[in-house]
Amino acid sequence: MFLNDADFRSDTVTRPTPGMLAAMHAAPVGDDVLGDDPTVKALESSAAERFGQEAGLFCPSGTMTNQIAINVHCRPGDEVICSPLAHIYNYEGGGVAFNSGVQVRTGGDAYGRLFPEDVHRLVQPNMDVHAAPTSLLVVENTANKGGGTSLGLPLLRDLHAAAKAHQLAYHLDGARVFNALVREGESMADYAFFDSISICLSKGLGAPVGSLLLGPKDFIAQAKRIRKRFGGGMRQAGYLAAAGLYALDHHVDRLAEDHEKAADIDACLESLPYVVERKPCHTNMVLFRIEAAGGAPALQQHLANLGIRIIAMDREWLRIVTHLDIQAAHIDQLKSALRSFAG
């Protein structure tokens, strides 16, 4: 016998908690496209204030907030610098090119971290008519394909200095920034130096839907027009915004529990002979590479047969993610199943 819902695929699979559902049920709402949903306004202003920004824009997804930011910061034909592991480069359907007509230049390490020397090396000279002018630096914290790597404020500030040395806008894909804040003991206000920030409410924080784009008032005014163009306007969105407000107030500090659960799983993987490589386990993700007959899909299927779901990143790499719906019994179930795999 095994438990139901041992779902380690992502921290996006959570269900709203009873307290969150109660907040959603009680939310006053209006029509956000017409600008009169009070709960959406409250969420946008609260999140912006917490991160030291002037304004916010509530959107359906983190992909949309990132794509809007790129569209506002760049002109067609420009170039964006990011990690080769970045979400905007790997997982947003080619939106950088399709939505904004810009191209990407990548650098950094195997954990999703860029360094100032990468920026200085990658930036294109504006006077060279053969080159696409660089206009934007994007960093992702934590880095998903890096294994949930936390970049840390010292590096983020050094990258800010590098961006400004070349007159680049500086955008944070903060889909899992709250995991980084909890790990590093940082505050949201520490991130005020970014030109724009995307934060996701439907990952570790457990809201059912929604991300926010934060930045200066004039930037958000432009972003609102692009959101409309992208089809991202929502009507009585206050019900969803209420979940986000509840998450910001109640679900940030508890992310430390997810980090502890991931570390427990990582320690188990270290002892398994078929696991040949692991990314550093900083937060709520465990990325590991196996060598076994059938590769990663074989282990994935073995776990699925025992009622456990994880994601295969490719033929060798797998990802396990902890979240608020993962209990101690799920961890025990997973570790037992991993140990029973023949490899």
Image (spheres, rainbow, N blue to C red):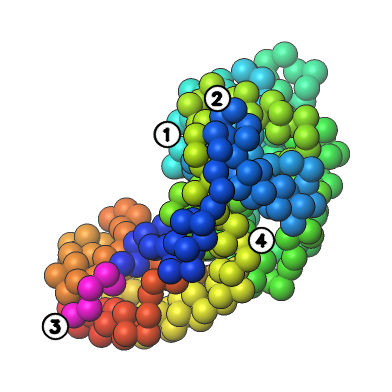
Query: Which mark is first along the chain, 3 or 1?
Result: 3
Residue type at tag 1 = Gly
* Residue 323 falls left or right of residue 190: left
Q: Is residue 3 magenta?
A: yes
Residue at figure coordinates x 62%, y 23% from the top left: 225
Q: Are marks 1 and 3 in contact (CB under 8 Å)?
A: no
- Residue 332 drawn at (x, y percent): 31, 86
The residue beneath circle 4 is: 151
- The foreground one among 326 and 149 is 326
Q: What amino acid is found at the position of numbered circle 2 in the picture?
A: Lys
Q: Amino acid at mark 4?
A: Leu
- Considering every residue shown, the one lying at the far top of the view is 129
Cα separation between marks 2 and 1: 19 Å
Magenta residue span: 1-6
Residue 292 appears anywhere in the view: no
Element at label 4: loop
Quick one: label 2 or label 4, which is nearer the N terminus?
Answer: 4
Q: CA distance from mark 3 to mark 4?
A: 41 Å
Q: Residues within 10 Å of mark 2 (few under 14, many from 20)?
A: few
Question: Mark 3 belongs to which amino acid?
Answer: Met
Name the residue tied to disc 2: 228
In magenta stretch: residue 166: no
Mark seen at residue 322: none
> Residue sitting at 79 percent across and 60 percent down?
190
> Which SS type dominates the magenta stretch?
loop
* Mark 2 / mark 1, whichever is N-terminal: 1
Q: Residues within 10 Å of mark 4 (few under 14, many from 20)?
A: many
| Residue bearing mark 1 | 93
Determine which residue is flagged by label 3: 1
Between marks 2 and 4 in the image, the one whose residue lies nearer the viewer: 2
